[in-house]
Image (spheres, rainbow, N blue to C red):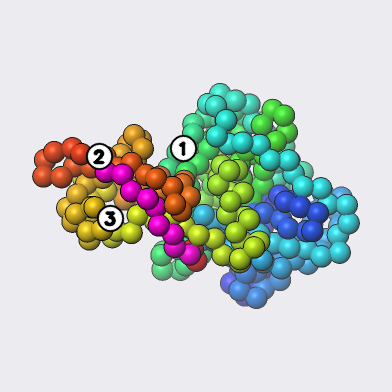
Amino acid sequence: MSGDDGSGTGTGIVLDGRGDILTNNHVVRAGGGGGAISVRFSGGQTVKGDVVGRDVGYDLAVVRVHGVRGLRAMPLGNSDNVRVGDPVVAIGAPFGLDNTVTAGIVSAKERPVTTDGDASDGSGVSYLDALQTDAPINPGNSGGPLLDARGLLVGVNSAIRSADQQDGDGEGSSQSGSVGLGFAIPVNQAKRVAEELINHGKATHPVIGVTLDLDYAGDGARVATPKAGLRAGDVITRVDGQPVHSGDELVVRTRAHRPGDHLRLTLRRGGQDMTLSLVLGSATGD
């Protein structure tokens, strides 16, 4: 992919016979502003593509190609059923090497990961409630499939952690590559976002509706403005029983849900712990 803002390469996942292809937002962001997007299939055919929709917060995008026959959708699995230790396979084009397959296991689930978005001022951050894998993932694997032992899609490979670059898969950087810490967007989340991008051009984000205190350096996420039963100064420590150590982790845990879901928050107020239930609101993503 290339555009006025630079160029990037990555991998995509065929969603249907119409030509809709799922990939990462950071793969297509150069072409998303009017630049050219080219899609090369494993058989060697190269065609032009158009961005149907993209979402910075989830780091997902859908590209549509036209006039390509015989496209078969990749069969989807259920990321909720994935277990730590399950064997997985990553497919992509690391460093431009097409049709590369690497194997490993699921190392962890629900790993909160933040990656740089497409804003130069750092405001466009992606929040991933990720599957962690030790299957080698390198630049060019982004947007490609993470498959289970039955060949079903369980995740969209999106980020790595390496020795000299903490997050993101490093297109255009000097990072050294995989050290066995890769992160994929769970397919259940990716499917919902992809459907909204195809149908509406944008995806919705679940939100609590509060502003967080970004200067808070303690454990948990401190509320700056009151809303939905929360008070300024409340420190949220758990979401549905899962620990929250920072504001970023709270956003990740929240975005793992859907708008309208019920959320159970554990918080510290005035030196006492308490539990609060609320219904998530909805906001349109970037």
| Residue 179 appears in the picture as rendered | no
Residue bearing the label numbered 3: 228
Q: CA distance from mark 3 to mark 1?
A: 25 Å
Indicate which label's residue lies in the foreground, 3 or 1: 3
Q: Which mark is residue 110?
A: 1
Name the spot of residue 243 as percent of width and height, x first.
32, 36
Q: Looking at the image, is 68 positioned above or below residue 110?
A: below
For discs 2 and 1, the disc positioned in front in the rendered view: 2
At horizontal 49% and vertical 63% (from top left) the residue drawn is: 285
Lower position in the chain sequence, tag 3 or tag 2: 3
At label 3, the amino acid type is: Ala
Instruction: Look at the image and tell me in which quarter the N terminus lies.
Output: bottom right
Mark 1 neighbour class, 10 Å CA radius: few under 14, some 14 to 19, many 20 or more: some
* Badge 2 or badge 1: first in the primary sequence: 1
238 or 248: which is nearer to us?
A: 238
Left of 25 or right of it: where is 211? left
Q: Which residue is mark 2?
A: 275
Q: Which residues are magenta?
A: 275-284
Query: Is disc 3 in contact with disc 2, using a CB cutoff of under 8 Å?
Result: no
Measured as percent of width and height from the top left, residue 67 is found at 86, 64
Separation of marks 3 and 2 at Cα, in angstroms: 13 Å
